[in-house]
Image (cartoon, grey):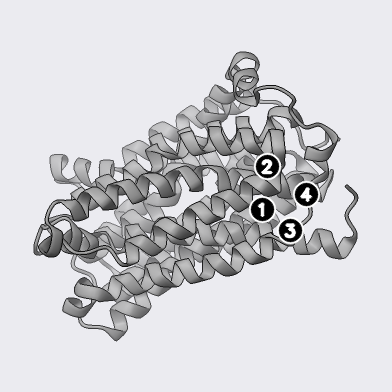
Amino acid sequence: MATTSDNRLRSMISGVLGNLLEWYDFTIYGFFAVEIGTALLGSGEGGGTLEALAIFAVGFLARPFGGAILGSIADRFGRKKALLLSVMGIIIPTLLIAVLPTHQQIGVWSGVLLLVLRLLQGVAVGGEFTGSLVFLSELAGQGRRGLATGFSVAMAMAGILLGSLMYTLLSSLMSADALGEWGWRLGFGFGSLMGIAVWLLLHTADESQGYVEEAAEESPLRDCIREHWRTILRSMMFLGLPAAWCYAVTVFIVVLLHHRLEVDAVFAGAMGSIAAGIPILLTPLIGAASDRYGRKPIMMTGSIAALLLGVPILALVDVSSTGMIVAAAVAGGVVLSMLQGGTAVALVEQFPERVRATGTGIAYNFSYALAGGTQPLLAFWLVDVTGSDLAPGGILVVLAVISIVAIPFCRETAFED
């Protein structure tokens, strides 16, 4: 199905807005983890933070299933159909979390329902971001794929930024008691309303040309695992670093500043906003640079920067100096831009069209389940065990080394048609 320039632009806008919705709805939970733990998990005085972060991680564990299921749907029946399903699957759980009864009202069932809703949300989110990357890269065509997927990632980071701004706004306007009792629910309610608007816009989008030309006739999942498992493993090796880095500088540092170092909540949220805001500006530019200079040089540069700066950035946060904390947030955002600008488009291009959405969904979501969603939980566990706020930096260093080892074995795909 051919697309006019206007239709293509509208379709691409709907795709990137889906990413904003996904990352807002999925990460707003992380910013309000303390309030959710108190209200729904029955642990007073912020004592439910680890439990709430554990459920945050469980949502990521469901994402590979969503990537496989919705990726297969995208490869067999169309990218647009899969995206519509995933967006609706995000809207409904987000709305239900906003109205969940508290632990005081229904006891342990509030935590059980929260867990179920996060699992359902995780399945839906598992197919949305990677589906959007495939959708946009196929609409963009050669020479613009890095730029297009860069915008996709930028809007995903805009979703995290919007979540951080929502947390900062509500924290500044409400008392801590009101925020914990009902204020956090406003963030989820806003997300569900935004999702409805995105779904309606996406409904008018065109299908991508890549799907129309070569739809999978049999089982994309079976073919992908049987024929492309090495590609999946290589992709996971370079995706683990941006996954962990993203949540280290946007969620972990915010919670660390406010609830461990006792920094003002508004300032802590602003630091998350800086770290999430910089990639909105830089990632499309770095994606465009990868169109010109290649994916692998950009990916390697970002991985080396992460290797060198992982621990120092946490050290800057730990000194509790305003200037140093701001510098850490800026550095974290710049490195995140470098990591995401090359890896997103490189991931999509590793797989042939007939299994592209499936392979991309599996590799991306397993990486983010293992290295991304668990990062805040594992990081705080390491801090508790070691007594050092720098300990989580070791995770980032190890993942940087794995990425540096994997990149030379990946195909350079920037100049392929």
Numbered disc 4: secondary structure: loop
Q: CA distance from mark 1 to mark 4?
A: 20 Å
Give the secondary structure at mark 3.
helix
**Separation of residues labelled 3 and 1 (CA atoms):** 12 Å
- Provide the residue designation for mark 4: 207
| Residue drawn at x 40%, y 60% as measured from the top left | 94
Residue under label 3, please give it.
Answer: 12
**Local crowd size for mark 3, using a 10 Å CA cut-off: few (<14), some (14–19), many (≥20):** many
Work out whether mark 4 precedes mark 2 in sequence or the reverse, and give the earlier one: 4
User: x and y percent of residue 403 in the render?
Assistant: 52, 31
Q: Locate residue 217: give its quadrant.
A: top right
Q: Mark 4 is on which residue type?
A: Glu
Q: Which residue is label 1 attached to?
A: 150
In space, the residues marked 3 and 4 are separated at their CA atoms by 10 Å
Mark closer to the observer (1, 4): 4
Question: Where's the C terminus, which quadrant?
Answer: top right
Q: Amino acid at mark 1?
A: Gly
Q: Are marks 1 and 2 in contact (CB under 8 Å)?
A: yes
**290 up-or-down from 219: above or below:** below
- Would you identify the image quadrant in which residue 103 lies? bottom left
The tag earlier along the polypeptide, 3 or 4, is 3
In the drawing, what numbered circle is on residue 345? Answer: 2
* Residue plotted at (29% across, 77% down): 171
Q: Amino acid at mark 2?
A: Val
